[in-house]
Structures are given as C-alpha cells and as structure tokens.
Amino acid sequence: MKHNFYSKIAYDRQLCDFCGACVAVCPHDAIELAEADLSITESCTFCANCVHVCPMRALEIIDAR
C-alpha cells in the first residue's frame, strides 16, 4: 500500500465528543483517547475509517505540506 505522507488526520476539538467510535474502528490502533484529548500515532495508514465513522464530523484528512 502506498501512503501519502503529506496527509494527516486532524480533529476539531470543539466538535469531538470523545465517544470513542474512531478508536473502535481503527484497524491499526493508531488513535489514542485519554482525558478529553485525542492523538493519532505514527501507525496511522490514513485508511479514513475514523473519518467516516465519526458522528460529529470532527475528523478529517488534511494536506500537511
């Protein structure tokens, strides 16, 4: 699989309700949720499962260049 290393997953802290849906669907355990903070680890492959499952639309893939 070819990865786009110019992309990253970003989340809007104002929209995120920390429900954990993104954590549950991540096949690489790349999302960590702790104390009302969400972080994406280096094991993220940008599959976008988290983006599609987020009920608050708080996650998106952005150009990180």
Image (cartoon, rainbow, N blue to C red):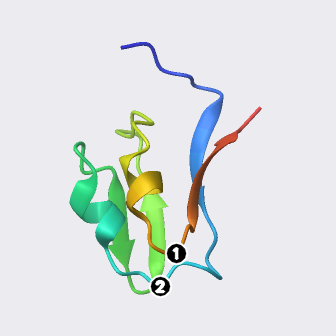
Type of the residue with mark 2:
Asp
Type of the residue with mark 1:
Met
Query: x, y (%) of residue 7?
Result: 62, 34
Image position of 12 with respect to 18: above or below: above
Q: Quadrant of residue 61?
A: top right
Say which residue appears at 29% left-offset and 63% top-offset. Answer: 23
For residue 56, the mark is 1
Query: x, y (%) of residue 36?
Result: 45, 85
Q: Quadrant of residue 53?
A: bottom left
The residue nearer to you, when weighing 39 against 25, is: 25
Instruction: Report which residue position mark 2 lands on.
Output: 17
Q: Does residue 30 appear left or right of residue 2 in this picture?
A: left
* Helix, strand or loop for disc 2: loop
The residue nearer to you, when weighing 65 against 46, is: 46
Q: Are marks 2 and 1 in contact (CB under 8 Å)?
A: yes
Q: Does residue 21 appear left or right of residue 61 in this picture?
A: left
Say which residue appears at 45% left-offset and 72% top-offset. Answer: 55
Q: CA distance from mark 2 to mark 1?
A: 7 Å
Say which residue appears at 45% left-offset and 36% top-offset. Answer: 46
Q: Quadrant of the N terminus?
A: top left
Discs 2/1, front: 1
Q: Does residue 59 appear left or right of residue 32 in this picture?
A: right
Query: x, y (%) of residue 54?
Result: 44, 66
Q: Residues within 10 Å of mark 1 (few under 14, many from 20)?
A: some
